[in-house]
Image (spheres, rainbow, N blue to C red):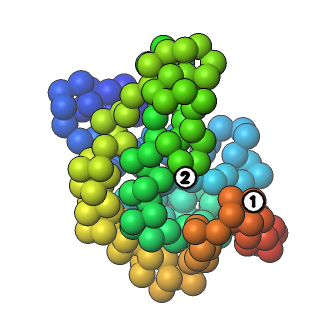
Amino acid sequence: MGVRAKAFMDSGALVPDEVVVGIVCERLQQADCVLGFILDGFPRTVAQADDLHKTLVQMSYPLQAVVSLEVGEEVLVERLTGRRTCRNCGAGYHLRFSPSRQPDRCDGCGGELFQRDDDREETIRHRLSVYRQQTAPLIGYYGEQGLLFTVDGMEDIALVQEKIVAILSALR
Ligand SMILES: [Zn+2]
């Protein structure tokens, strides 16, 4: 499946849902998934969710919970546009939440800090619009199935983690 996906990516095409779902399902068949697994940022569309559901039912591995981390769009934009990356060693910084000691210089190696294309505001605004169109419908989709848990992602990281762990622990 990975080889098939690479052929699509090399040609600049989007990887079809069936191939994406195939990659995930191949991974879920490995021994370390026997006690459970967490999918992060997948599925991203209702079509992927439908494919995933069919495959997981066949594998007797139905999803038990879906956690939606809710963060206001302007906060997301601030979090993402503030990220800076060291050109030399790849270390990550944030202008507001984790600034380097000298502006635009890496604390570790002195390399130049830059903003990745992924973190530019126009890229993020575009991704948010794709999210609204393609991914946000999953909230209703999983809500109807009684699988959805929402967590306020605006709170402190430690509290967010605690809430996610509490949701997942209650499933056992
Ligand atoms: Zn560096």
Which residue position holds label 1?
A: 158
Earlier in the chain: of badge 1 and badge 2, it is 2
Q: Nearer the viewer, residue 22 or 65?
A: 65
Q: Position of residue 93 (x, y in %)?
A: 54, 36
Give the amino acid type for the residue marked by disc 2 in the picture: Asp
Looking at the image, which residue is at 63% across and 18% down?
108
- The local secondary structure at tag 2 comes to loop
Q: Nearer the viewer, residue 137 or 113?
A: 113
Q: Relative to residue 114, is residue 161 drawn left or right?
A: right
Q: Nearer the viewer, residue 90 or 51?
A: 90
Q: Position of residue 140 (x, y in %)?
A: 42, 81
Looking at the image, which residue is at 50% across and 42% down?
95
Q: How many dots with numbers?
A: 2
In the depicted structure, whether residue 71 falls above or below residue 147:
above
Looking at the image, which residue is at 45% across and 71% down?
72
Quadrant that contains the C terminus:
bottom right
Quadrant containing ligand 1 reads top right
Numbered circle sitting on residue 10: none
Q: Relative to residue 116, is residue 62 drawn left or right?
A: right
Which residue position holds label 2?
A: 40
- The local secondary structure at tag 1 comes to helix
In the depicted structure, whether residue 77 falls above or below residue 89:
below
